[in-house]
Image: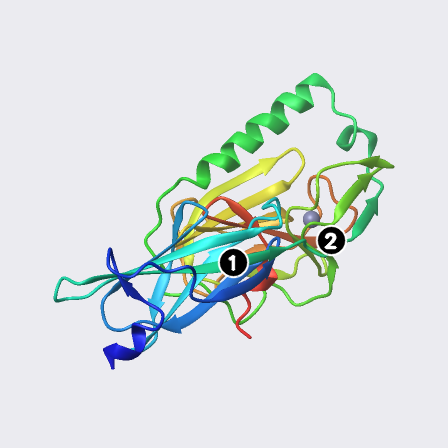
Amino acid sequence: MLKLFFVLWCLIGIVPMTHAQDWQAAQGDIVRLETDAPQGVVNIRAFDIDWPVKRLSDSRIVAWVGVGIKTKPATYPIVMSLDLADGRHFLRTDQLVVAKGNFRISRITVKKKHANFNPKSLARIRSDQRALGRTYNMPVDANPDVQIDFMPVEGPITTPLGAQRYINGQPRSPHTGVDIAAPEGTPAKTPLAGKVLLTESMFLTGNSVVIGHGNGLYSVFVHLSEILVKEGQWLATGEVFAKVGQTGRATGPHLHWSLRFHKKRVDPLSLLRK
Ligand SMILES: [Zn+2]
């Protein structure tokens, strides 16, 4: 059995290798790497980050790697290391080929106070951003899963991740999540278990909730009409945590869902199990 793996894995210091396998991704993707790996401890490293790994069987593992929307299209190494119980250590280097994301243009018109900020608003926006940023460092017990089977609400995606935003005609940063249209008051369910890390009313994002799912994965849900949970609360997959609304800078009721995976901005839709 082990012999087979020598095709891809090599004993450290003995066999030099170029790379074993190519994986394809676009900016904003979460790449699912399913590959052979004999029993042992596997570590997957890319972009200087260790990514979550789950064992599927005695001979197969799956790992997830996040490609940020700002990651430059290029080829990157993925280093996989394997420690066997008998002390042997194997190494393998794959390649991740990142293509440009297929991002579209999105134009919206909002109230003047939400487009041209006075110094007071600007200070508030910055403090909101810092509060959100702090949550991405909060440790959360690992959830056994990284993929989801349903969306937090049912509805059409009105703005995808990465859409180039024009707000009142001015070019702005790309859209940081997905917008799912749904009627005001629709219950939003967490698609993955996790801990509530933040519940706050913010200037641009309105009523906002951050849920940490473990494994470096954090969901941000905003523009909520009502928040039904408290900071520190643990939610099981499918639990209702809020109601859809249009608080903050929103042009109609919808759920905006952003995802951070080891701080990289990735597409929530790429979490869906295919
Ligand atoms: Zn949005």
Mark 2 lies on residue: 103
Of 117 and 248, nearer the camera is 117
Residue pushed farthest left? Answer: 86
- Would you say 137 lies left or right of 185 here? left
- The residue located at (85%, 41%) in the rendering is 109
Measured along the vertical axis of the image, is residue 211 above or below residue 6? above
Mark 1, other Cα within 10 Å: few <14 / some 14–19 / many ≥20: many
Measured along the vertical axis of the image, is residue 50 above or below residue 180? above
Q: Secondary structure at mark 2?
A: loop
* Disc on the earlier residue, 2 or 1: 1
Numbered badge on residue 96: 1
For marks 2 and 1, give the CA distance: 20 Å
**Rendered image quadrant of residue 138:** top left
Residue pushed farthest right? Answer: 169
- Residue 122 rendering spot, x and y as whole percentages: 67, 23
- Residue 183 rendering spot, x and y as whole percentages: 72, 60
- The residue located at (69%, 39%) in the rendering is 248
Residue pushed farthest top? Answer: 119
- Mark 2 or 1, which is nearer the eye? 1
Say which amino acid is labelled 2: Phe
**Rendered image quadrant of residue 42:** bottom left
Of 220 and 33, nearer the camera is 33
- Residue 30 rendering spot, x and y as whole percentages: 53, 59
Residue 58 in view of the camera:
no
- Would you say 126 lies left or right of 38 here? right
Q: Is mark 2 within 8 Å of ligand 1?
A: no
